[in-house]
C-alpha cells in the first residue's frame, strides 16, 4: 500500500517536473525567437560571444569537475587560480617579454606564455593539494570545504598584492578587428579563443580516455581503495588531476587576459562561481557535462546581457544563479550526471 | 566505534563546562563593561581615554555584538545542524532592508507612525525598533524557509552552492532594486539613510548614546544565546545534532529531516535578520554594496574559529574577529608603523589572515578555540582510526567518514 502511494507520488512529481521543464524551454525559445526576429545580426553576434565565453568557462569548469570527480571536493580556490593565471600571463607577456602589439615574435611569446602559465597554475594547484587538502582527505566533508574557502582567500591576497586593488588593463597581442560574414561581425579574438580551447579540450579528452594515467584517474574516482589494491599510486593520481585542472585554469587565465585585456584580483571569485555553476549544471564529475553546462551558461549569459529584449548585464548573476537553483531543485544530478545512491 | 577506541587509549574526555557558570560569567562581563564605559572611563586621565578610543572604542564593541548575533544564528545552521551555509549575508541584508523600509523616510508616499518616537509630521514608515525587530525576524524566517526548501534534496556541497547562489542573488536584487518596473525597492547603490534611531522608554537615542545601544545589543545577543542553548537541549536541538552526525541514521530513527532542517534555516535566518536590523541602526543607514560574499565568510570564520556548535566559543570567535577586523588590525598597524617608521597597510592583510586562519584551524584544530565535545569527537574520528593502523598503512576507510 505504502509502496503504491510512493510510486504514484513519484510519478506525479515526474510529470509535474516534465510539464514545468517543457514550459520553461518553450518560454525560452519564444524569447529567443522574438529576439532573432527583432535583430538577426545582433542575435548571431551575441550568440557567438556567448559561445566563446562558454568555452572559456568550460576550461575552468573542467578543473572543478575533475577535482570533484576524484575527491568529491568543491575546490573553491580554483577560480582564484584562474585569476592568478591571468595575472601571470599579463606579466609574462607585457612586462617580462615586453610585447605590446601583434607581431611574429608575439605569437612565439604567446605560445611560450601559454605553456608557462599552464605549468605555473598546475604547480600551484598541486602544491595546494599537497599541503592542505591531502591531510584532510579523511576528515568530515566540512573541513576540506572550509579549507578550500581559506585557500581561495589566500590566492586572492596574492592577487591583491600582485595586481593592486583596482582593475588593470593590458595590451593584447591578438589581432584586433573582425571577420565579417554578410553583416555579422565576429572578432578575431573570439575565433582565436576557439582555436586554443578546442585542441586543449581534445587533448584533455585524450588523456582521460586513452592514456594509462587517465585510466588510473577514472579508477581512483570510482574507488580509491580498490585502485590502490590494483597498484595505482592514488596520491600521485590525485596530484596529476589537480595539475591537469590547474593547467586548464592557466590556459583560461591567459585567454581571458588576452581577449579582454584586463586583470583584477576578485575576478576569480565571480568567474569561478559561474564556472562551478556550469559544472554542476552538466552534472558534476562528468567531463562532457562540464563543457555542455559551460556552453549553456555562456549562451544564457550572452543572450541576457546582449540581446535587445533581455534583463541586461546587471542581472547577469541573478539569472545564472536562479537557473542553478531551479536546476538543483528539479534535477540535482545535473543534465548528464547519473543519480547516485547514498553509501552506508 | 571511535569513542570506544578513544576510551581504551586512555585519553580523558574533558567534562563540559557548566552552562550556568558561563551564563553568569557572560552577564557579569557585560555589566562590568557597561560600568567601565559609563562610569569609569569619563573619570580617567585623557591619555587613558584616548588609548581606549584607539583600541577599544565603544562603537566597535557594539558592532562586534552585531556580529555575535549573526554568528550565533549561523552557528545554529552550521554548528548544530551541520548544513554549510555560504550565503548568510542574504539574511543580514534582508534584515537591514527591513529596518530601512520600516524605520525611515524612504517610503515617503506613505505616512505611518507606530510606537516610534520620531516626529509625526515626517513622511515615511516609522515603526518602533522593537516592532521592526519582530518584522525583520519574521521576514527572514520566511526567506530562510524559502531558501532552505529547495536545498532539502541536496547533500552538503550542493547545499553550500545553493546558499551561496542565494547569497549572491539577494544583494544583487538590492543593488539593482532602484527601479523594478518603476518601483523603488531599495534605492540602489545610494542606499537608505538615515534610519531612525532606537526609541527606548519614550526617549530617542542619539548617535552618541552608545551605552544604551550596547545594552540593547547585549540583550539581543543574550536572547540569541538563550534561544540557542534552550533549543539545543530540547527535542529540536537533539534532532539537529543527530542530522549533523549522520543524516541517514537520523532519518532511520524517525527524525523528520525536512522539518528539522527547515527549522534550522528559519532560526538561523531569524538571528541574521535581527543582526541586520541592529546593524542598520548601528551604522544609521543601509547600503547595498556592503553585502558581499566576504561577510558570509567572515561569519563562517567566526563560527569555525570559536568552535562550531558551542555558543560560547562562537561568541568568543565573533568578538575576537570583529575586533581584529574593525579596530585591532588598524590600531596595531598604526602602532607598528609609528614605532618602526614603516608604512605597511595592515588592513590589506585581512584576506591573508582569514584565509590562513581557516586553513590552519582546519588542519590543526578543527574543533575551534572552545570546542564542543561531541563535535570534537566527530571531527577527529578519522585520526582516532588512524592510530589503530600501522603507521604506513594509508588505506582510507569509507566507514570512517
Image: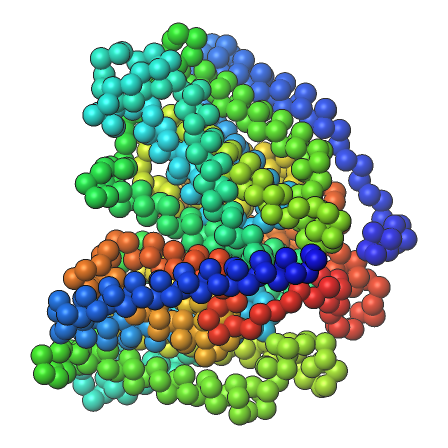
User: What is the total number of numbered labels drawn onto the structure image?
Assistant: 0
Q: Position of residue A29 (x, y in %)?
A: 28, 68
Percent coordinates x, y for residue A237 in the rendering: 60, 80
Question: Outermost residue toward the left?
Answer: A183
Q: Give coordinates of residue A111: x percent, y percent.
A: 32, 85
Report the residue at 43% width, 88% height from top: A203
> Residue at left 31%, top 16%?
B113
Is residue B385 at all visible to an observer of this figure? Answer: yes
Taking the spot 50% from the left edge, 29% from the top edge, the residue there is B65
- Compare residues A261 and B135 and report the one nearer the observer: B135
Residue nearest the observer in this picture, B204 or B307: B204
| Relative to A26, residue A177 above or below | below
**Quarter residue A104 falls in:** bottom left
- When the figure is inspected, residue B294 is found, relative to residue A249, above or below; the finding is above
Q: Quadrant of the N terminus of chain B?
A: bottom right
Is residue A153 shown to the viewer in this render? no
Residue A239 left/right relative to A254: right
| Residue found at x 59% / y 73% | A70
The C terminus of chain B, quarter of image: bottom right
Residue A196, percent from left and from top: 32, 84
Amino acid at each position: 500500500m505504502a509502496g503504491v502511494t510512493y510510486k504514484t507520488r513519484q510519478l506525479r512529481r515526474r510529470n509535474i517536473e516534465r510539464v514545468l521543464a517543457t514550459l520553461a524551454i518553450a518560454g525560452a525559445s519564444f524569447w529567443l525567437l522574438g529576439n532573432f526576429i527583432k535583430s538577426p545580426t545582433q542575435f548571431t553576434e551575441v550568440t557567438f560571444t556567448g559561445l566563446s565565453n562558454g568555452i572559456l568557462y568550460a576550461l575552468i569548469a573542467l578543473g572543478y569537475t575533475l577535482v570533484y570527480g576524484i575527491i568529491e571536493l568543491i575546490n573553491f580556490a580554483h577560480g582564484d587560480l584562474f585569476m592568478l593565471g591571468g595575472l601571470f600571463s599579463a606579466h609574462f607577456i607585457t612586462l617580462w617579454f615586453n610585447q605590446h602589439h601583434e607581431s611574429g615574435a608575439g605569437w612565439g611569446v604567446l605560445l611560450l606564455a601559454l605553456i608557462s602559465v599552464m605549468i605555473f597554475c598546475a604547480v600551484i594547484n598541486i602544491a595546494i593539494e599537497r599541503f592542505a587538502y591531502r591531510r584532510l582527505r579523511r576528515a568530515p566533508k566540512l573541513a576540506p570545504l572550509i579549507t578550500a574557502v581559506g585557500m581561495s582567500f589566500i590566492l586572492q591576497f596574492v592577487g591583491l598584492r600582485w595586481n593592486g586593488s583596482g582593475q588593470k588593463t593590458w595590451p593584447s597581442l591578438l589581432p584586433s578587428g573582425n571577420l565579417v560574414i554578410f553583416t555579422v561581425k565576429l572578432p578575431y579574438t573570439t575565433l582565436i579563443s576557439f582555436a586554443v580551447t578546442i585542441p586543449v579540450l581534445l587533448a584533455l579528452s585524450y588523456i582521460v580516455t586513452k592514456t594509462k594515467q587517465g585510466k588510473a584517474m577514472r579508477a581512483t574516482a570510482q574507488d580509491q581503495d580498490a585502485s590502490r589494491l590494483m597498484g595505482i599510486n592514488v596520491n600521485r593520481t590525485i596530484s596529476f588531476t589537480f595539475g591537469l585542472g590547474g593547467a586548464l585554469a592557466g590556459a583560461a587565465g591567459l585567454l581571458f587576459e588576452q581577449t579582454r585585456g584586463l586583470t583584477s584580483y576578485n575576478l576569480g571569485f565571480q568567474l569561478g562561481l559561474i564556472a562551478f555553476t556550469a559544472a554542476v549544471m552538466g552534472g558534476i564529475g562528468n567531463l562532457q557535462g562540464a563543457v555542455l553546462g559551460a556552453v549553456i551558461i555562456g549562451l544564457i549569459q550572452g543572450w541576457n546581457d546582449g540581446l535587445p529584449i533581455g534583463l541586461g548585464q546587471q542581472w547577469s548573476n541573478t539569472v545564472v544563479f536562479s537557473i542553478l537553483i531551479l536546476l538543483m531543485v528539479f534535477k540535482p544530478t545535473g543534465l548528464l550526471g547519473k543519480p547516485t545512491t547514498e553509501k552506508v | 566505534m571511535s569513542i570506544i577506541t578513544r576510551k581504551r587509549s586512555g585519553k580523558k574526555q574533558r567534562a563540559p563546562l557548566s552552562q550556568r557558570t558561563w551564563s553568569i560569567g557572560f552577564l557579569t562581563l557585560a555589566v562590568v563593561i557597561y560600568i567601565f564605559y559609563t562610569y569609569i572611563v569619563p573619570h580617567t586621565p585623557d591619555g587613558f581615554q584616548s588609548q581606549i578610543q584607539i583600541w577599544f572604542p565603544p562603537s566597535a564593541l557594539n558592532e562586534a555584538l552585531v556580529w555575535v548575533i549573526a554568528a550565533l544564528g549561523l552557528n545554529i545552521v552550521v554548528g548544530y545542524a551541520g548544513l554549510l551555509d555560504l550565503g548568510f549575508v542574504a539574511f543580514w541584508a534582508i534584515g537591514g532592508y527591513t529596518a530601512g523600509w520600516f524605520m525611515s523616510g524612504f517610503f515617503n508616499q506613505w505616512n505611518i507612525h507606530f510606537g516610534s518616537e520620531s516626529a509625526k509630521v515626517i513622511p515615511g514608515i516609522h515603526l518602533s525598533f522593537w516592532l521592526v525587530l519582530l518584522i525583520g525576524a519574521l521576514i527572514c524566517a520566511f526567506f530562510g524557509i524559502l531558501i532552505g526548501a529547495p536545498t532539502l534534496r541536496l547533500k552538503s556541497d550542493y547545499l553550500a552552492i545553493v546558499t551561496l547562489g542565494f547569497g549572491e542573488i539577494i544583494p544583487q536584487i538590492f543593488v539593482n532594486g532602484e527601479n523594478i518596473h518603476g518601483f523603488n525597492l531599495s534605492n540602489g547603490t545610494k542606499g537608505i539613510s538615515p534610519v531612525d534611531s532606537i526609541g527606548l522608554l519614550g526617549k530617542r537615542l542619539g548617535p552618541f548614546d552608545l551605552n544604551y545601544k550596547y545594552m540593547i545589543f547585549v540583550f539581543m545577543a543574550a536572547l540569541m544565546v538563550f534561544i540557542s542553548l534552550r533549543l539545543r537541549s530540547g527535542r529540536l536541538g537533539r534532532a539537529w545534532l543527530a542530522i549533523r552526525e549522520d543524516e541517514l541514521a537520523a532519518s532511520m530513527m524517525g527524525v523528520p529531516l525536512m522539518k528539522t532542517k527547515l527549522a534550522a534555516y528559519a532560526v538561523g535566518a531569524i538571528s541574521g535578520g535581527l543582526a541586520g536590523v541592529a546593524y542598520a541602526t548601528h551604522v544609521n543607514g543601509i547600503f547595498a554594496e556592503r553585502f558581499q560574499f566576504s561577510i558570509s565568510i567572515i561569519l563562517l570564520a567566526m563560527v569555525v574559529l570559536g568552535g562550531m556548535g558551542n555558543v560560547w566559543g562562537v561568541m568568543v570567535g565573533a568578538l575576537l574577529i570583529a575586533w581584529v577586523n574593525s579596530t585591532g588590525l588598524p590600531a596595531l598597524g598604526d602602532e607598528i608603523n609609528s614605532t618602526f617608521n614603516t608604512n605597511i597597510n595592515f588592513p590589506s592583510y585581512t584576506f591573508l589572515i582569514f584565509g590562513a586562519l581557516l586553513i590552519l584551524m582546519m588542519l590543526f584544530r578543527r574543533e575551534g578555540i572552545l570546542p564542543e565535545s561531541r563535535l570534537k569527537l566527530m571531527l577527529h574520528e578519522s585520526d582516532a582510526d588512524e592510530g589503530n593502523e600501522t603507521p604506513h598503512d594509508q588505506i582510507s576507510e569509507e566507514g570512517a567518514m
